[in-house]
Image: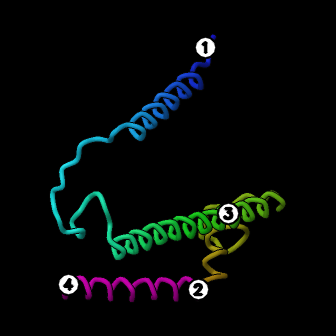
């Protein structure tokens, strides 16, 4: 049987940090040495332009995280809808054959031949353009 001591230990660490922070804040302060007189190079203070750039970076990162999270949620929703749809269909085993009868690869190729040709052609053109661009630089 394992005893659960995680919460008391975490609480003790938090309390120690809280008390230590209060002691540091209430005391005379730590000694500091001013290394530069230019506020642009200071590590203690920031200028308005530096704060503005920091705010833009933070907003950009948060926006990117929100967009990625929404995209992942949409992808999971889309995939779960596909799984649900397949789950409601009747059981029709897939036959790995090139014959154009029944539920096989041959049937899929025969029914979607133009889509396959156009897709492969587009991929070859894109690959050719990428190779050409990479070899030019």
Name the residue located 76 percent from the left edge and 61 percent from the top edge.
86
Name the residue located 84 percent from the left edge and 60 percent from the top edge.
88
What is the spatial separation of the Cα atoms under label 4 and label 2, in whole angstroms?
30 Å
Q: Pointer 4 and pointer 2: residues touching (CB < 8 Å)?
A: no
What is the spatial separation of the Cα atoms under label 3 and label 2, in whole angstroms?
22 Å
Query: SS class of the residue under badge 4?
Result: helix
Q: Residues within 10 Å of mark 4 (few under 14, many from 20)?
A: few
134 and 115: which one is in front? 134
Magenta residue span: 114-137
Residue 109 spot, x, y in % from top left: 60, 77
Which corner quadrant of the image does residue 20 belong to? top left
Badge 4 or badge 1: first in the primary sequence: 1
What is the spatial separation of the Cα atoms under label 3 and label 1, in whole angstroms?
40 Å
Badge 4 or badge 2: first in the primary sequence: 2
Q: Pointer 4 and pointer 3: residues touching (CB < 8 Å)?
A: no
Q: Is residue 56 left or right of residue 67?
A: left
Residue 112 spot, x, y in % from top left: 63, 82
Badge 3 or badge 2: first in the primary sequence: 3
Residue under numbered circle 3: 79
Numbered mark located on residue 135 in the image: 4
Residue under numbered circle 1: 2
Mark 2 vs mark 1, foreground winner is 1
Count of labels in the image: 4
């Amino acid at each position: 049987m394992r005893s659960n001591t995680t919460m008391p230990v975490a609480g003790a660490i938090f309390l120690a940090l809280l008390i230590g922070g209060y002691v540091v804040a209430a005391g005379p302060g730590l000694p500091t040495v001013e290394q530069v007189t230019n506020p642009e190079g200071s590590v203690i203070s920031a200028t308005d332009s530096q704060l503005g750039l920091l705010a833009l970076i933070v907003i950009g990162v948060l926006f990117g995280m929100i967009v990625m999270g929404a995209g992942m949620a949409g992808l999971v929703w889309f995939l779960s809808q596909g799984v649900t749809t397949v789950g409601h269909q009747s059981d029709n085993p897939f036959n790995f054959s090139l014959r154009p009868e029944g539920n096989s690869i041959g049937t899929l190729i025969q029914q979607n031949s133009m889509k396959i040709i156009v897709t492969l052609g587009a991929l070859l053109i894109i690959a050719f353009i990428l190779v050409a661009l990479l070899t030019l630089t």
